[in-house]
């Protein structure tokens, strides 16, 4: 169930001035990310 709800997250690709963002469409997604202590503002790879 967790993967089902998190699988619906959409990543909006950023540009030089805007970082990539995650579009959350349901409140359950935000709640799950909070429970997992996940910072969606932190990218996996450092900016080059």
Image: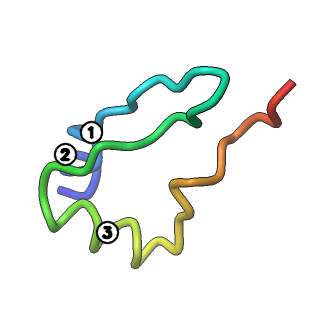
The numbered mark, 3 or 2, whose residue comes first in the sequence reads 2
Which element type, helix, strand or loop, lies under badge 1? loop
Residue at 29% from the left image edge and 43% from the top image edge: 23
Residue at 56% from the left image edge and 33% from the top image edge: 18
Position of the C terminus by quadrant: top right
Q: Residues within 10 Å of mark 3 (few under 14, many from 20)?
A: some
The furthest residue to the bottom: 35
Mark whose residue sits in front, 3 or 2: 3
Mark 2 touching mark 1, by CB under 8 A? yes
CA distance separating discs 2 and 1? 5 Å
Q: Position of residue 30 (x, y in %)?
A: 29, 66
Residue 32 image label: 3
The furthest residue to the right: 48
The numbered mark, 1 or 3, whose residue comes first in the sequence reads 1
Counting the numbered discs, the total is: 3
Q: Residues within 10 Å of mark 2 (few under 14, many from 20)?
A: few
CA distance separating discs 1 and 3? 12 Å
Q: Is residue 22 left or right of residue 47?
A: left
Residue 4 image label: 2
Q: Would you identify the image quadrant in which residue 17 lies?
A: top right
Which element type, helix, strand or loop, lies under badge 3? helix
CA distance separating discs 3 and 2? 11 Å
> Which residue in the protein does label 1 denote?
7
Mark 3 touching mark 2, by CB under 8 A? no
In the rendered view, would you say 29 is above or below 5?
A: below
Residue 17 image label: none
Q: Position of residue 15 (x, y in %)?
A: 58, 21
Q: Position of residue 1 (x, y in %)?
A: 17, 56
Q: Position of residue 12 (x, y in %)?
A: 39, 29
In the rendered view, would you say 33 is above or below 18?
A: below
């Amino acid at each position: 169930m967790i993967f089902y709800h998190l699988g619906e997250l959409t990543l909006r690709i950023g540009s030089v001035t805007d970082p990539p963002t995650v579009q959350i469409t349901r409140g359950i997604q935000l709640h799950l990310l909070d429970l997992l202590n996940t910072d969606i503002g932190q990218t996996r790879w450092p900016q080059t």
